[in-house]
Amino acid sequence: MKKIFTLFAVAAMLLMVGCKPNPVSILNQSKADYAEVVAEMPDSLVAFYEVEMVLDKPISELNHGQEVQLLSAVTVIQMSDSVKFITREYDKKNQIASCEVEKEKGFWLGDFNMPLDSLNLDFADAIQRLKETNIVLPEADKVTLRKPAAPPFRTYYIFGTKGTFFVDVDAITGEVSEYQAPEDDFVGIKINEEVAE
């Protein structure tokens, strides 16, 4: 009887581990998005700028032993004189629940083109690095994967929002540090005046 109970306990643990959803792969999705846009037009007219993400709870919950996962992500890609926004919502199993695509005439400012093939850390890796450092994390549910057009010109997962503070994880080295956003750190779309008229 004891052996049967042990077998049931082991089977239950395996079932629980097997049911844990895989984290969303931001890098694989970004590479697929980029490849799709490049197929539409020449590579020289395409720039991959950032992925803006929203978590299901503040990143500071990692300091309390809690887990966080993605609720949504917006991918920003420049296509000649238009900016393409790909918005995805995720369910509790980290599967895409919905996807919307929009285009706006204009130019994306505040970021450098992100070289996706040079990045080593995916979103789950960045979360793991935060857990390993035991650094105090901001009470914010926003994350952005971007290469700011300000020194030191590196690609980061930036956790936090204005009004809290920022912590970044270098997407190449995995180094964790506090991020100091420049006072004039504007990121967004500039409408092409000639096209808007």
Image: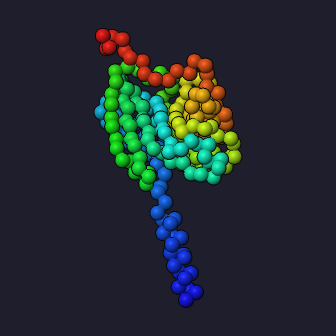
Which of the two residues, 174 or 44, is positioned nearer the viewer here? 174
Q: Could you say which is closer to the camera, residue 80 or residue 177?
A: 177
What x and y, as percent, mark residue 196? 32, 14
Report whether 175 appears left or right of 38. right
- Residue 49 to residue 4: above or below: above
What residue is at 67 percent from the left and 34 percent from the top? 178
Q: In which quarter of the image is residue 83?
A: top left
Q: Which residue lies furthest to the bottom in this view?
A: 1
Quadrant in the picture for residue 28: top left
| Quadrant for the N terminus in the image | bottom right
- Residue at 63% across / 31% down in the picture? 165
Q: Residue at 33% x, 37% y: name it.
A: 100
In the rendered image, the quadrant that contains the C terminus is top left
Q: Is residue 116 visible?
A: no
- Give the colour scheme shown: rainbow
Give the camera-side residue of 99 and 105: 99
- On the image, the x and y values in percent for residue 8 come to 51, 79
- Tally the numbered discs: 0
Q: Position of residue 188 (x, y in %)?
A: 46, 23
Residue 171 % position (x, y): 57, 40
- At a point 62% along the width and 43% down the height, the residue shown is 60
Residue 47 seen from this side = yes
